[in-house]
Structures are given as C-alpha cells and as structure tokens.
Image: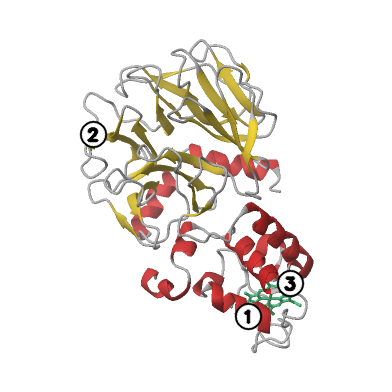
C-alpha cells in the first residue's frame, strides 16, 4: 500500500492544478500521457472511444492504443464533464499556457467543437460534474469545493470539509445535497456545503464519487475498491475490489448502454466494465486482468520476483537503469520506468518462462511456475503501467515514440 502521505500528495496533484503541467505540455508530446484528469464517453462512437482530459489537451482514446488530439481543445484540460440531460453537451476546465486559470470550455456537439462558455470568467475547477437533481448546478474542486448555480458562469466556495477533499459530486436526487470524498471517508452535506456529516462509506480515502443514471451512487475507496449505495439509505456495499494500489480518478457511464462504465486511474490507465462495475478489464482489451488473477500475480511477484525487480517493480537499481552486475544488466524496472512495455505479453511470457540469455540471474521460471501463474504475474505487472504503456505495448511502441 502507498503510505497515506504519498497518496495525499498524488491526489492533490490530481486536483490542484500545477502551472508546471502547462509548461511541460509545451515540450511534451501527445503520446506521453502520464495522467488523465477526467473521462467522458465519446457520443460519436457510442463508447467505442473515450474523451480524456490531459495536460496536453483533450484526446480521443481508442482501444487499439492510439489516441488523437481533439484539435479544437489544445489547452491543458483539468476536468471534463458531460450533461446528464444531454451527453453531447460537454464542459472542460482548462489552464492557459502560463499555468493561469483558463476558459471554462463548452461543446454542444459531443466534443468536436469547443468554445469558451459565454459569460464565464477564467477559472480552474477540477473534478467537474453536473447535477441531475438541479438544473444549472455544477460542482467542482479548486482549493475549496466550488458550486455554480448558473451552469458554470459564476462560482462560489463552500465551507471546507473536515479533511482534505479529493472528489466531489452533486446528489442525483436531492437538490441541496452534495458529496465530498475526503482523506478520511465520504462526507455529505444537505445544505449546499454549509455543514458536513459522515456518509457511512468507511474511513478510507475516497478518491472518486459519482452517480449513475439510475440514481445510485458509486464511490472509490482507496485500498478497498468501488462501493455502491442508494441515496435513500446510504448503505454501502463493495461492488468490485482487486485494484491493488491503484485509485480511481474519474468514472463515466455510457448513456446508450448504462451497464458500460469507463474509469481512469492514477497510473494513467483506463479500465472498463460491461456489467455495471462488478468486473473491470483494461480498455485495450486484456480480459485476463481480473482482480483474482491480478491479486494472485501480485503474490507470486512478491514471492519470486521482488527480490530483484523491487517493490512494485521499480527495478534493482531505481534511477540508474544502466547499472550492471558481473553477468550483465541488473534487473530492470517492470513498471513504467524502463521498457518492459516494449515487449508483447508473449515476449514477456517467454522471458519469464525461459529466462534471459543476457543475464543468467534471470532464470527460467517454467519449472517453478505454471503458464497460468506466469499470465497472472503479467496481469499484475501491467497494473503498474500507464495508458500510454498499455496502449503502446509490443510492436506498437515504435509508432508511439
Ligand atoms: C535473481 C534476480 C532475478 C529474479 C528473482 C527475477 N529476475 Fe527478472 N530479470 C533479472 C535480470 C538481471 C534481468 C535482466 C536480464 C537482461 O538483461 O536481459 C531480468 C529481466 C527480466 C525481464 C525482461 C525485462 C525487459 O525489459 O526486457 C522480465 C520481463 C523479467 N525479468 C521478469 C521477471 C519475473 C516476472 C520474475 C519472477 C517470476 C523475475 N523476473 C525474477 C533478474 C531477476
């Protein structure tokens, strides 16, 4: 598990928008997506592609691993929301090239064309969402929780929650109610954020809170998983676990097929569910990556691989990828830092099963591990990768450079 302080820092970067990311964007390229701040279903393809908010602009991501910049929205996008009454009506909060608050952008054609929202001053609001219960209400997160009751034109701050806040959402059914995911659990306010009480989702950090079209609530509890409750009783139950160290940042529901959900994680990965959130697979389609396989793979990794490849696959000599021992290169990082993702699943499988001809310390594991166990380890290793690595894995990596 990540120490809570690291988690808080990671989450704050997700929600507080650093000028540095805008500067980086000018030297970065669209294929090096490390963080995704928001996700929406692309109405043009009915969930075949998703729109993602990144520091490089708004991208349309495809399951085959390619993503393209939406030309009309090149500014760094810090959050993305669609109108539950009309999925083609989208909003995006941006930062300008100097890192200052940018325009709140609006699209009425499903994310193709974008224009600054008329009558709105530049603002930065993360974790943007629109109310199902109250027309014109938008809510988001800056250093404080922000509410707009005129569809984004003007914003006001509400009273602080008792602890650091990472996620906010309006109630789907009660006009004055809002939820806040904080470091110590989910809070609810029935007076537009004046006063807060615990919403009964446990005391783990809540990194994402949203509602679905049927009026149910979904919350992501770090180290537990995705929780669901009805507003009438706020009795939370675990819908899906097995996300290991990853935490969910944003979730979008396909309006055409309500059981289809898409979610972005802190690693930059996109996962999807076709059964309302009970089972998740990676967007690029590996269905071996179930929580059971991943959990087993993590255990096997810790027992067989971690001694050389490091905790969470950071490598034997983190920060010094060229380091050698007397046989050859030291055990490389298997997370995003090195180039494990340049190899296909088949290539990685072969190395684990047969060993490496380049350094005999990487022995053949075929005697010790079954084929399925090796597949489980690969499924776990891939949870450490970003969307970019997943999407650019194997032969595709050449086209991604
Ligand atoms: C005794 C140390 C050691 C152990 C244990 C070990 N490895 Fe390795 N591994 C290495 C070394 C050293 C290399 C570098 C070999 C090379 O240069 O080709 C390597 C290379 C690899 C590679 C190739 C990475 C790349 O980017 O080309 C993979 C994949 C890999 N190991 C996976 C595993 C897995 C999975 C396990 C556990 C089942 C494991 N290793 C256990 C030392 C180890």
Residues at badges 1 and 3 in contact (C-beta under 8 Å)?
no
**Within the displayed image, which quadrant is ligand 1 positioned in?**
bottom right
Classify mark 3 as within 8 Å of ligand 1 or not, answering yes or no: yes
Where residue 208 appears, x then y in whole percent? 54, 35
Packing grade of label 3 (10 A; few <14, some 14-19, many >=20) is some
Where residue 319 appears, x then y in whole percent? 62, 67
Name the residue nearer the viewer: 395 or 315: 395
Quick one: quadrant of the C terminus? Answer: bottom left
How far is the residue under mark 2 from the one under mark 3? 51 Å
Quadrant of the rendered image containing residue 135 = top left
Residues at badges 2 and 3 in contact (C-beta under 8 Å)?
no
Residue 351 is marked as 1
Q: Which color scheme is applied?
A: secondary structure
The numbered mark, 2 or 3, whose residue comes first in the sequence reads 2
Name above or below for residue 48 compared with residue 308: above
Residue shown at 49% from the left, 64% from the top: 389
The numbered mark, 1 or 2, whose residue comes first in the sequence reads 2
How far is the residue under mark 1 from the one under mark 3? 15 Å
Quadrant of the rendered image containing residue 214 = top left
Classify mark 2 as within 8 Å of ligand 1 or not, answering yes or no: no
Query: In the image, which is nearer the foreground, mark 1 or mark 2?
Result: 1
Name the residue nearer the viewer: 241 or 153: 241
Which SS class for mark 2? strand
Residue shown at 50% from the left, 28% from the top: 168
Residue 308 is marked as 3
Quadrant of the rendered image containing residue 91 = top left
Q: Which residue is mark 2?
A: 116
The numbered mark, 1 or 3, whose residue comes first in the sequence reads 3
Residue 140 placement, left or right of 207: left
């Amino acid at each position: 598990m990540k120490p809570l302080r690291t988690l808080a820092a990671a989450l704050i970067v997700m929600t507080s928008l650093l000028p540095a990311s805008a500067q980086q964007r000018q030297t970065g390229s669209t294929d090096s997506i490390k963080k995704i701040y928001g996700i929406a279903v692309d109405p043009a393809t009915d969930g075949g592609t998703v729109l993602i908010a990144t520091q490089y602009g708004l991208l349309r991501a495809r399951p085959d691993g390619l993503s393209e910049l939406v030309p009309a929205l090149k500014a760094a996008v810090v959050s993305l929301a669609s109108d539950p009454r009309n999925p083609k009506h989208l909003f995006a909060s941006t930062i300008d090239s100097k890192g200052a608050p940018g325009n709140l952008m609006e699209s009425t054609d499903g994310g193709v064309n974008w224009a600054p929202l008329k009558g709105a001053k530049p603002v930065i609001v993360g974790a943007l969402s629109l109310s199902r219960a109250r027309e014109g209400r938008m809510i988001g997160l800056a250093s404080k929780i922000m509410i707009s009751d005129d569809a984004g034109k003007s914003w006001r701050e509400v009273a602080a929650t008792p602890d650091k806040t990472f996620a906010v959402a309006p109630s789907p059914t009660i006009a004055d109610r809002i939820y806040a995911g904080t470091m110590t659990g989910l809070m609810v306010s029935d007076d537009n954020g004046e006063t807060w009480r615990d919403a009964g989702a446990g005391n783990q950090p809540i990194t994402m809170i949203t509602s679905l079209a049927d009026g149910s609530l979904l919350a992501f509890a770090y180290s537990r998983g995705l929780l669901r409750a009805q507003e009438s009783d706020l009795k939370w139950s675990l819908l899906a676990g097995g996300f290991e160290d990853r935490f969910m940042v944003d979730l979008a529901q396909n309006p055409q097929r309500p059981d289809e959900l898409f979610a972005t994680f802190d690693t930059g990965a996109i996962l999807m569910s076709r059964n309302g959130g009970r089972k998740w697979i990676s967007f690029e389609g590996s269905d071996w990556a179930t929580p059971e396989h991943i959990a087993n793979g993590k255990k096997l990794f810790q027992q067989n691989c971690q001694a050389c490849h490091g905790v969470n696959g950071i490598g034997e000599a983190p920060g010094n990828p060229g380091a050698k021992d007397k046989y050859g290169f030291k055990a490389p990082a298997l997370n995003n830092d090195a180039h494990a993702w340049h190899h296909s699943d088949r290539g990685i499988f072969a190395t684990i099963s047969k060993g490496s001809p380049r350094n005999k310390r990487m022995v053949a594991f075929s005697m010790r591990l079954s084929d399925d166990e090796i597949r489980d380890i690969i499924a776990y290793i891939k949870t450490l990768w970003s969307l970019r690595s997943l999407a650019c894995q194997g032969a595709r990596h050449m086209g991604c450079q």
